[in-house]
Image (spheres, rainbow, N blue to C red):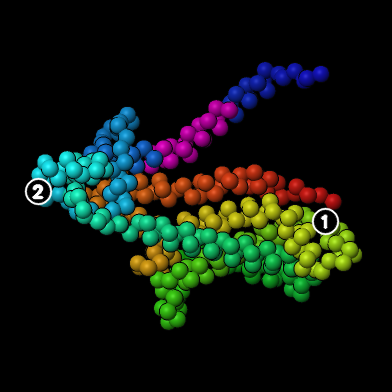
Amino acid sequence: MAAVRTSGEIAFNRIAIVAVLVVMVIFLAPIYWIASTAFKPRALATTVPPTVLFQPELTPFVKLFTKRVQQTKPVDPETYAAAPWWEKAVYDGGERILKVGDSPQLSPYPDRFANSLIIAISSTLFAVGMGTLTAYGFSRFKVKGEADLLFFILSTRMLPPVVVAIPMYLMYRAVGLNDTHIGLIILYTAFNLSFSVWLMKGFIDEIPKEYEEAALVDGYTRMQAFFKIVLPEAATGIAATAVFCFITAWNEYAFALIMTNRRAQTAPPFIPSQVGSGLTDWTVIAAGTFLFLLPVAIFTFLLRNHLLRGMSFGAIRK
């Protein structure tokens, strides 16, 4: 028989739903504002009061991916008529039109975006891989001074990264790692490793040791038992750890600004530099930010089931 809810319980549920909706609106409002600004004409980006209803256009994305200069003189009608639609849209917005036959020069944004992908993915793989192995060692073997070692690993996250930025910059300059992909990969891996070790240790501790002992009795080596027994059982923890490490590396700003200039610069320090021709072009900045949000959103969405299960820290019990 279904339990009958009291009026107090019903009122509480309704209040909880309203509170959740309010919080959701607060968190999603900036996302909506960035997405809408990315498709606005430049003239509507800073209107007061803000423009909510408008005709979307892709001009900000065209300007984001190509180098532009301010229009200085009118274009003859023949050139304008022969230009593709995106060039006409850019010209109508006050930027120089590219004549037919001109090879459009790509802006630095695609390279910066690719740098972010390379560095974030590589550092995540290294941090999660080394963190899983280290966590397995602490979880399954008696390590002398284990508590002190774990505290030392955790202590690397007690200071904001910007505190060590200047010493790291001087060391990197001395060894030639400034403005290199490997330099940022090492940095992001080092700062994510402590988080990875502690999070993965909690997951591996929940995996019964009897599984491995049974595999060892059947003739498996310790390494074979790790790869065939522990890793599949820890897949939820690995996915959750990978999401957090990827987000941290993807969004990092201070080191990317200080340690890089052009070759290895990532998207976070590059996007604010897109001031446009003349005044700041907020539509281009919003377009770059909108595209920058997509990989993290897609990666988190694909691993959403593992991430939700991983928050329980105890899906596997003896």
Other residues around mark 1 within 10 Å, as few (<14) / some (14–19) / many (≥20): some
Which portion, as a residue range, is magenta? 17-34
The picture places residue 61, in percent across and down from the top left corner, at 32, 46
Q: Using the rendered image of the protein, determine whether residue 278 is visible from the camera's viewpoint.
A: no
Question: Which residue was labeled with disc 1?
Answer: 208
> Is 167 in front, or is 296?
296
Residue 109 versus residue 40 in the image, above or below = below
Tell me the residue at 43%/41% (across/down): 31
Which SS does the magenta portion mostly show?
helix
Helix or strand or loop: what does disc 2 sit on?
Answer: loop
Tell me the amino acid under the disc marked 1.
Pro
Among the 4 quarters of the image, the one containing residue 215: bottom right
141 left or right of 27 in image: right
> Is 265 in front, or is 25?
265
Look at the image and say whether residue 31 sits in the magenta stretch: yes
Question: Which residue was labeled with disc 2?
Answer: 73
Look at the image and say whether residue 20 sits in the magenta stretch: yes
Tell me the residue at 25%/49% (across/down): 280
